[in-house]
Image (cartoon, rainbow, N blue to C red):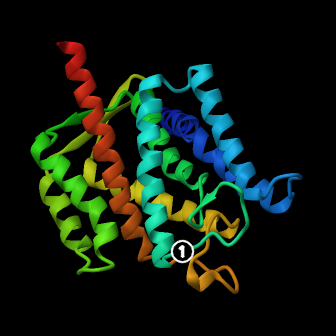
């Protein structure tokens, strides 16, 4: 029975870590089915996201340091959204007062929710990193992955080269986590793939409820192409690298 109990404990901690993303998905579903009065749907989603963020900090579910990380991801995600919508990669067809250059401001919270999950899971599962690559390798790699989301529209797409480089850089790296007092480990590359896969599933749910729209979904909803998982995988890697780097810098500051 112990493996089953450990699995339940792990699932519970994961569910608690996903609180912010769950609220966003629930809001997408509810506002799609039940139109809210006075304001357009995108504006209500922004208000709900802001209230949820305030409640999480106010209740202690998130620390102020985690709020800083999440705010950084909101800006990073919003910058990517502005560019991708401008390039026609996807669109937000509904009206909204909080749209800037065709992008509703709530969209940044979808990226922030990924950071929220990582920060929450990191703390709840007492994550530790083994054989983490040096700072001078991690930061340029994260920057190159993020920049490729922009540059591949004008130059060659090097995502598969970057993916191969990730495997090489993190070949000996492991993530250690704790469940019910027992410590487990997993290759970091495997954790990237698993998180990226579940975000791809979440993306299908989000587009079904009209969070955004790909060109091939303009007439009717269809499954997001499996190739998009590579984009989410790389985005997860960037997210993980940023969170891990900030956590390690913070830990060193405390030691000093």
Q: Residue at x 18, y 36 (%)?
A: 130
193 with respect to 203 (left or right): left
Q: Quadrant of residue 217?
A: bottom right
- Percent coordinates x, y for residue 61 in the rendering: 56, 25
Q: Quadrant of residue 18?
A: top right
Is residue 56 visible in the rendered image? The answer is: yes
Q: Residue at x 43, y 73 (%)?
A: 228
Residue 216, relative to residue 152: is it above or below?
Answer: below
Q: Nearer the viewer, residue 180 or 219?
A: 219
8 with respect to 232 (left or right): right
Looking at the rendered image, the quarter that the C terminus falls into is: top left
Q: Residue at x 71, y 42 (%)?
A: 48
Residue 24, relative to residue 154: is it above or below?
Answer: above
- Percent coordinates x, y for residue 188 in the rendering: 26, 48
- Percent coordinates x, y for residue 45 in the rendering: 70, 50
Q: Secondary structure under badge 1? A: loop
Is residue 179 visible in the rendered image? The answer is: no
Q: Quadrant of residue 178?
A: top left
55 with respect to 154 (left or right): right
- Percent coordinates x, y for residue 215 in the rendering: 57, 83
Q: How many marks?
A: 1
List the residue tagged with mark 1: 90
Q: Nearer the viewer, residue 166 or 54?
A: 54
């Amino acid at each position: 029975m112990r493996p089953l109990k450990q699995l339940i404990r792990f699932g519970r901690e994961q569910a608690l870590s996903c609180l912010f993303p769950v609220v966003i998905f629930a809001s997408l579903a509810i506002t799609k089915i039940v139109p809210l009065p006075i304001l357009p749907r995108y504006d209500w989603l922004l208000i709900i996201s802001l209230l949820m963020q305030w409640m999480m900090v106010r209740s202690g579910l998130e620390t102020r340091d985690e709020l800083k990380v999440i705010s950084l991801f909101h800006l990073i995600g919003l910058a990517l959204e502005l560019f991708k919508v401008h390039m026609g990669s996807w669109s937000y067809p509904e009206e909204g007062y909080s749209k800037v250059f065709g992008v509703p401001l709530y969209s940044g919270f979808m990226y922030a929710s990924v950071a929220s999950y990582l920060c929450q899971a990191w703390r709840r599962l007492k994550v530790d990193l083994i054989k983490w690559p040096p700072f001078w390798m991690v930061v340029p790699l994260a920057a190159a992955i993020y920049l490729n989301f922009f540059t591949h529209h004008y130059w060659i797409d090097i995502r598969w080269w970057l993916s191969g480089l990730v495997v090489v850089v993190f070949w000996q790296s492991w993530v250690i986590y704790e469940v019910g007092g027992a410590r487990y480990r997993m290759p970091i590359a495997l954790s990237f793939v698993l998180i990226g896969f579940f975000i791809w599933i979440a993306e299908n749910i989000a587009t079904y409820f009209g969070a955004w729209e790909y060109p091939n979904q303009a007439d009717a909803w269809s499954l997001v192409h499996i190739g998009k998982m590579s984009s989410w995988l790389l985005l997860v890697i960037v997210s993980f690298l940023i969170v891990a780097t900030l956590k390690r810098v913070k830990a060193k500051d405390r030691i000093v």
